[in-house]
Amino acid sequence: MAEPVKCLQCDSAVTTAYCGVCGQKASTRRFSFKEVVITDFMYGVFHTEKGFFYTVKELVTRPGHSIREYINGKRAVHFSYFPLLIILVTISFLVSRFAEINIAEIYDKNGQGVFSEVQDFYHKYPRGYLLLSIPIYSLFSFVFFIKSGLNYAENIVLNCYRTAGESLFTIAFYIACIFIKNIDLISVMYIGLQLLVLLYMIWFYYQFFSFYYKVKWLLFLKTIIVSVLITVLSTVSIIFVMGIYGAS
């Protein structure tokens, strides 16, 4: 039998690899650069069985199905929704700094000046935009898909993942804009980005809610209508909230 050692956390006697009282490892050592970078950071964040890249892959290949499974309890293999969203939005923000895009100029060229304030706000304050937009997205999806029986909190989770998936398109757009400086071409690309985001929203919602609706063609039609409405109504709501905040 192994000689007991004192737990460094709670001072209990430990004879196994972990303390039976608090769960602390029986033996610890000083941190090394290799351990921090390779073992803790790379394994903890990017490990394919429970991490960043696995969830990103799922958001690209089967977004609605995988996130429904997550909400229904299969959570061990997924990277958590809010940290994932913050990481991807932060990457998008950092890449956009290199792209040096004037969002207002793009919207003016596309005749969408009314929406430029929202996108400019997102461009400058991505985390603030998320705190404002996710609850609004979730309210609309909760109301429009109430038949699914999901509560408001679950709609927040699914919309965090949906927005994270959409951020992948935004990152790709900003990366392309680092190498492309023609504002006319960028304007066309931006229209394409908006279309892709809308199509992704339709695909995401259709996959996610397909489990709850039997008539698939009716669900598909509903997801198209709802996705367009959510896009427009959410943007209008955000503009309204921003107007109230700016006036106060």
Image (tube, grey):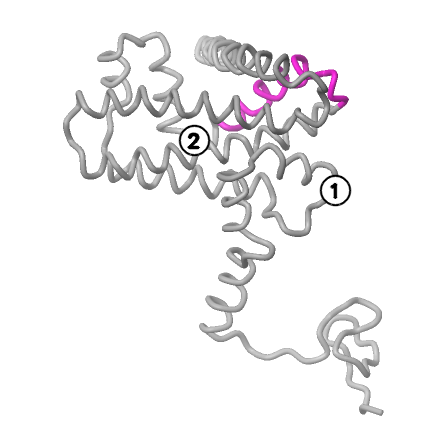
Overall secondary structure of the magenta section: helix
Q: Which residue is mark 1?
A: 73
Q: Residue at x 64, y 51 (%)?
A: 77
Can you say whether 164 is above or below 49 in the image?
above
In this view, the residue in front, 8 or 20, is 20
Disc 1 and disc 2 in contact, CB within 8 angstroms? no
Give the CA distance from mark 1 to mark 2.
29 Å
Give the number of the disc on residue 2. Answer: none
142 sits to left or right of 43 = right
Q: Residue at x 64, y 78 (%)?
A: 28
Q: Which residue is mark 2?
A: 126
89 sits to left or right of 216 = left
SS for dot 2? helix
Q: Residue at x 31, y 9 (%)?
A: 112
Q: Which residues are magenta?
A: 130-149
23 sits to left or right of 191 = right
Q: Residue at x 34, y 21 (%)?
A: 120
Task: Say which of marks 1 and 2 sits in front.
Answer: 1
Check disc 2 and give the amino acid type.
Pro
Q: Residue 219 location, x and y as percent?
A: 63, 16
